């Protein structure tokens, strides 16, 4: 990919190519509605914050294997999209909307939504396996990181599992429910570029925590039209949130503190200054803006 290509376009191409492969070769005998649902679940792409962070870290570390970086970014986005499909199911959030349109189970049925999420998870690991031949050690590291941040004990599956417990460990819940894929983003970006991934975990944790607090604020203050998904989910499902714990002003202060710590935690790398700008830009995108849209 030429260096002048915008990051957004690069991510779009990587994800689109991955979804195309997941849907099957043109003319192949595949279940048409499931194939359509894979595309539906991944478009429009939303902000694609996680692959943006992943690619930005890879660029900051040299990005000497861009094809591997592209596969890592696409695989992470597929996992994220799969988690949204499953989160919206009636057995979890029972959400009718996602990104301003009917959720997958509303548009295609519950069975196809389950299969869509499952298919996207499998496609994510297939993308990494395809790209691993270019740099096998890095490819294996990417697979292990994504697996660790997707399943048990500390991945997004564990995050969803905490909601079925009578007593919730709030720190563990937030680390697995929200921060896990941000840790995957920072660690996979480093690993794709040949850097040691462990030092990048703290940055991912801080960004993930900031995202969770910002999401809590938006859920409490914005309406469904502004969010593009059902509002008030935390309150409706009795989930812990930064707003219920700290209040709106306290949550806003907490968000500022986390973001400052995130920038300070960036490991030394050739593109450190550039990466700090990316984190600041993502912070501005995360922060709820005035006037706040209050629900009636």
Image (spheres, rainbow, N blue to C red):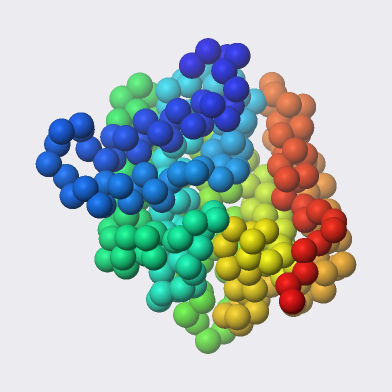
Say which of 168 and 117 sits in front: 117
Say which of 24 and 226 sits in front: 226
Name which residue lies at 57% across and 84% down. 167
* Left or right, 18 with reference to 195: left
Q: Position of residue 275 (x, y in %)?
A: 71, 31
* Left or right, 223 with reference to 112: right
Name which residue lies at 37% across and 31% down. 17
* Left or right, 204 with reference to 25: right
Q: Is 44 drawn above or below residue 276 in the view shown?
A: below
Name which residue lies at 28% across and 60% down. 112
Q: How many marks?
A: 0
Say which of 117 and 269 sits in front: 117
Q: Position of residue 32 (x, y in %)?
A: 21, 48
Q: Is 181 drawn above or below residue 254 in the view shown?
A: above
Name which residue lies at 57% across and 18% down. 5
Q: Is residue 127 visible?
A: no
Give the residue furthest to the bottom: 166
Q: Position of residue 283 (x, y in %)?
A: 75, 45
In terms of image quadrants, where is residue 133?
top left
Q: Quadrant of the C terminus?
A: bottom right
In terms of image quadrants, where is residue 125?
top left
Q: Position of residue 33 (x, y in %)?
A: 25, 52
């Amino acid at each position: 990919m030429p260096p002048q290509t915008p990051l957004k376009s690069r991510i779009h191409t990587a994800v689109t190519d991955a979804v195309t492969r997941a849907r099957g070769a043109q003319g192949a005998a595949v279940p048409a509605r499931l194939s359509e649902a894979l595309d539906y679940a991944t478009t429009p792409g939303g902000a694609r914050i996680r692959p943006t962070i992943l690619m930005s870290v890879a660029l900051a570390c040299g990005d000497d294997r861009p094809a591997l970086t592209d596969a890592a970014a696409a695989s992470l986005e597929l996992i994220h999209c799969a988690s949204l499909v499953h989160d919206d199911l009636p057995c979890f959030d029972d959400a009718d909307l996602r990104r301003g349109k009917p959720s997958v189970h509303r548009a295609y049925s519950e069975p196809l939504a389950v299969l869509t999420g499952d298919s996207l998870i499998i496609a994510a690991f297939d993308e990494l396996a395809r790209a691993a031949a270019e740099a096998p050690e890095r490819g294996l590291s990417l697979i292990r990181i994504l697996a660790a941040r997707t399943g048990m004990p500390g991945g997004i599956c564990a995050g969803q599992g905490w909601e079925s417990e009578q007593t919730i460990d709030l720190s563990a819940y937030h680390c697995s429910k929200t921060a896990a894929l941000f840790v995957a983003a920072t660690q996979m970006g480093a690993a794709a570029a040949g850097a040691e991934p462990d030092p990048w975990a703290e940055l991912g944790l801080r960004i993930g925590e900031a995202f969770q607090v910002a999401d809590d604020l938006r859920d409490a203050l914005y309406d469904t039209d502004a969010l593009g998904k059902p509002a008030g989910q935390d309150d409706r499902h009795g989930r812990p949130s930064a707003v219920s714990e700290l209040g709106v002003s306290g949550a806003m202060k907490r968000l500022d503190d986390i973001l400052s710590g995130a920038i300070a935690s960036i490991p030394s790398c050739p593109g450190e200054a550039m990466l700090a700008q990316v984190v600041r830009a993502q912070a501005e995108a995360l922060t709820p803006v005035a006037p706040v849209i209050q629900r009636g």
